[in-house]
């Protein structure tokens, strides 16, 4: 093995290790924020109140993988699919996506999601940021229906 190959291999391993650590840290923070925000929102809607989410709130930025090119409003670009199989320590989300920002839309129930995408048989992950999902949702039932549709889409992909 040449010095160049050894250097390239070491660089790849360090990069993937750094990405795994960063994903776990940001995933934990994002999950905590999403759970707290979601519980408060569903509770407020269930009580017939407009949630205090007039402002858009975002978790840690999508990443650290690079962004894909040619992302549709929802899903992965042509030739790529959601990565949900823990590919070499990446793709830790069971459905391949996670909530990024909340508070969009007419009643503050809309949100955007980050989506891990990859080509079949490859662990080169890129990320797509969705458009606003559930922009017209105003009740807990609306949000639940939209989330179930997203999960069905992820399972089909």
Image (spheres, rainbow, N blue to C red):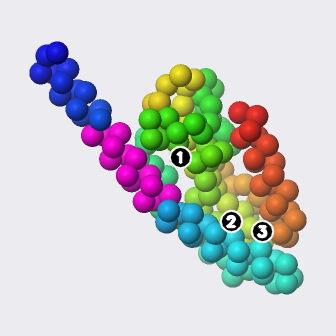
The residue to which callout 2 is attached is 104
Look at the picture and state if 150 lies above or below 107: above
**Would you say residue 136 sits in the magenta stretch?**
no
Q: Quadrant of residue 146?
A: bottom right
Q: Position of residue 66 (x, y in %)?
A: 43, 40
For residue 20, side relative to residue 4 (left or right): right
The answer to whether mark 2 and mark 1 are in CB contact below 8 A is: no
For label 3, the residue is 106
Location of residue 9 by image quarter: top left
The stretch of residues the image draws in magenta is: 14-27
Check the image and report above or below for 126 versus 41.
above
Instruction: Give the percent coordinates (x, y) of residue 139.
Output: 85, 70
**Quadrant showing the N terminus:** top left
Q: Position of residue 47 (x, y in %)?
A: 85, 84
**Residue drawn at the location 83% of the way across and 69% of the way down:** 140
Q: Is residue 31 left or right of residue 156?
A: left
Callout 2: few (<14), some (14-19), or many (20+) C-alpha neighbours within 10 Å? many
Which of the two residues, 151 or 137, is positioned nearer the viewer here?
151
- Whichever of labels 1 and 3 marks the residue nearer the N terminus, that label is 1
| Relative side of 4 to 38, left or right | left
């Amino acid at each position: 093995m040449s010095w160049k190959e050894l250097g390239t291999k070491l660089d790849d391993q360090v990069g993937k290790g750094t990405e795994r650590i960063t994903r776990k840290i940001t995933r934990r923070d994002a999950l905590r924020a999403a759970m707290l925000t979601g519980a408060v929102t569903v509770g407020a809607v269930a009580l017939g109140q407009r949630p205090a989410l007039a402002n858009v709130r975002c978790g840690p930025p999508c990443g650290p993988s690079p962004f894909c090119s040619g992302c549709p409003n929802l899903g992965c670009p042509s030739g790529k699919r959601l990565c949900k199989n823990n590919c070499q320590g990446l793709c830790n989300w069971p459905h391949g996506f996670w909530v990024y920002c909340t508070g969009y839309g007419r009643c503050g129930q809309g949100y955007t999601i980050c989506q891990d995408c990859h080509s079949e048989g490859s662990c080169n992950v890129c990320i797509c940021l969705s458009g606003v999902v559930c922009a017209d949702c105003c009740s807990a039932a609306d949000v639940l229906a939209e989330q179930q549709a997203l999960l069905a889409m992820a399972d089909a992909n």
